[in-house]
Image (tube, rainbow, N blue to C red):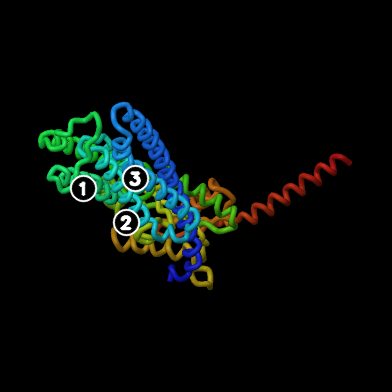
Amino acid sequence: MFKLLRGAADEEATLRAQTGLKVQAEQRLLLVIKSRWIVLGLLFVYGLITTFSYYKFYSFSAVLKISTMPLLVLLATALCNTAYHLSWHLLPDTWLPRIKYFIRTQLIVDTLVATLLIHFTGGVISWFWTLYVLLIIEYSHLMPNLKDILVNGSIPLFFYTILVTSEYFNLIHSVHMPFTPHSLQTQPTYVLIVWFWVCFLNIAAIFIGALIQIKEKQAIKDGLTGLYSRRFFDYILTSEVERAKRFSRPITLLMIDIDNFKEYNDSFGHLEGDKALKLVGRILSSNIRSRRIHPAYDIDIACRFGGEEFAIILPETQSGNHRKGNKAPASGAVILANKLRKQIKSSTSITVSIGIATFPDHCCDVRSIILAADKALYRAKQIKDCVEISTTSLKKKQSITVVNIKKADSRKKLRSL
């Protein structure tokens, strides 16, 4: 029932989340595209310098034979990057639903290009294997989760192993480069040392990328409950309130507090208290609107506000009505609040009190929505195991302010007389 009543809100919030995802993905992808242009430019300059330096020692035909394929690979890569860049800007509706597959395809193409450059510049004696490290940094920047980084980060190692093995057993003809001894390409000790070194550095880069991803998640997540942190809550609430002002949309804040939590800790111990906090966190996470398939995102934001207090940000949602004292059926955020309260009570011995406030009905900015929800929570905690909606009326405040201004003006006029 709660989902049906909030169907329109879901659609609006989903559009908001998709827009946010597009902006975030666009920033990351454009950064990668620009970085790719820089790398291509440096490689092209390097190719020109080495080509001209070869003329002092080799004939024109020999230099042309050595340089043609690497330069063609760089040119093909530049064309692919141009198409990649243009398609993102010209076909955004095609990109967003399939963004994961586009990213994966582009990463495979980049790996193939790096492998071709390694092959055409000497194979195992080529220093272009360092491009694999750059690719793994690219993977960790674009991939949405830890599993993707670990799985896709192994692709360069697979390509390099196939290339080195094929060249060593003469399945692929090795390219001889100037100023390097050709015997190294068939020397098993040298080949193994280089292969192990490349694998070691790439695996190290994979784990560094994974560690960065873990640290980024830890920065916005509460370690105990898995909910978003207070810092992330402040950031999201500020942006959502500003968006609500800009588009004249409602946003509701739920403040949730565990009743008598100190006594619960004193009676059962802090370990049981931590279990209770984790349970509340799981119940909150399982009841908010979210999308779990790629691209995954949360529409409602559940946070640990501090201690035994939690908060949920509900974009595009009204506070709704209570059943008691109101003939209209319960609606809006009240349905979710009562559902959470009942689930927590039935799952454990603890109970929760919930305060609700909505912008623009009860407040006018971030500070006032927190204050209004906190006051409603305070009233709920006097009763315990209940839901209270803020009684603060922004319209009433505004009318009182207007009356006070008029009274002040009339006093000034009387004084002037």
Q: Nearer the viewer, residue 287 or 151?
A: 151
Q: Which residue is mark 2?
A: 282
Q: Which residue is mark 1?
A: 158
Q: Secondary structure at mark 2?
A: helix
Viewed as shown, does residue 262 lie left or right of 243? Answer: left
Is the residue marked by circle 2 packed among few (<14), some (14-19), or many (20+) residues within 10 Å?
some
List x then y, in percent, for residue 215. Answer: 32, 41
Q: Quadrant of residue 413?
A: top right
Residue in the image at 12% along x and 45% along y:
169
Is there CB contact under 8 Å for labels 3 and 2?
no
Mark closest to the chain's N terminus, 1 or 3: 3
- What is the tally of numbered marks visible in this picture? 3
Question: Cα distance, mark 3 to mark 2?
Answer: 51 Å
- Label number found at residue 226: none
Q: How far is the residue under mark 1 from the one under mark 2?
A: 39 Å
Q: Which residue is mark 3?
A: 73
Q: Earlier in the sequence, mark 3 or mark 2?
A: 3
